[in-house]
Image (cartoon, rainbow, N blue to C red):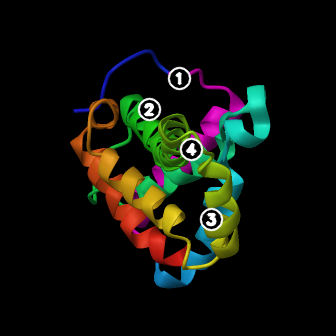
Amino acid sequence: EWQVGEEIAPDRKTQEFIGQIKEALETGPPSEDEGPDIAERTGWDTCAWYQPMHFFGHDWGIFIRRDCIREIAAQTARFLPNGTPYSPALLKALIRAGFAALFLHEQFHHKVESLGIRLHVVERSCRYIPYQKSVYKPTYGTDDNLEEALANADAFLRANTKPYSFWMGKTVVGALQAYLKWRFPFD
């Protein structure tokens, strides 16, 4: 079911990561008590971020921290069915899951800015900067920030679409969605 490819080079860091994945496969889903700590370590704002063209010009883009991809991969492994055996292909699928969760969340922010650009062209008036100033920024870091909630929902739903679902396989997609569903209340 996982996509097969080349083996991952077994350097020291990779061996440590493989150990984390194997341990996670035996651990099972985290408890509610673990939620705040996991959310703090893998916060959407610290693990990945979108730098809008409006504010960063040529330095715009989506930026993702590798350590967070690995942490989310390990947390996702905890949601796999009991007895799921480790394999290099599973490791790759879990890494892709960690990447997809962060990338898709940030890509939603890019979509919002892209809509702002389209509206600017059609209406001949800037919409994105006023939106950022009067809607996004005042609710930043609160449960009232609709864009962040929609970015989470978009990442959750799109993980089950191609090409992401193909890269991860059905079982890992299910585990990623279970992890995200468990995780979102702590954000």
Contact (Cβ within 8 Å) of mark 2 with mark 1: yes
Q: Which residue is mark 3?
A: 136
Three-letter residue code for mark 1: Ile
Residue 153, position as x, y percentages in the image = 38, 60
Crowding at mark 1 (Cα within 10 Å: few <14, some 14-19, many 20+): few
From this viewpoint, which residue is outermost toward the bottom?
A: 33
Is residue 84 in sight in this rendering? no
- Could you tell which of marks 3 and 4 lies nearer the N-terminus? 4
- Could you tell which of marks 1 and 4 lies nearer the N-terminus? 1
- Could you tell which of marks 2 and 3 lies nearer the N-terminus? 2
Crowding at mark 4 (Cα within 10 Å: few <14, some 14-19, many 20+): many
Instruction: Say which of 44 and 80 sits in front.
Output: 44
Residue 21 is one of the magenta-drawn residues: yes
In what quadrant of the picture does the C terminus appear? bottom right
Residue 45 lies, with reference to residue 145, above or below; the image says: above
Using the numbered discs, state the Cα–Cα distance from disc 1 to disc 3 in whole angstroms: 41 Å
- Could you tell which of marks 4 and 2 lies nearer the N-terminus? 2
Is residue 14 in sight in this rendering? yes
Q: Which residue is mark 1?
A: 8
From this viewpoint, which residue is outermost toward the top?
A: 6
> Which circle marks residue 92 in the picture?
2
**Callout 2: helix, strand or loop?**
helix
Q: Nearer the viewer, mark 2 or mark 3?
A: 3
Q: Which residue is mark 4?
A: 113
Three-letter residue code for mark 3: Tyr
Using the numbered discs, state the Cα–Cα distance from disc 4 to disc 2 in whole angstroms: 31 Å
**Callout 1: helix, strand or loop?**
loop
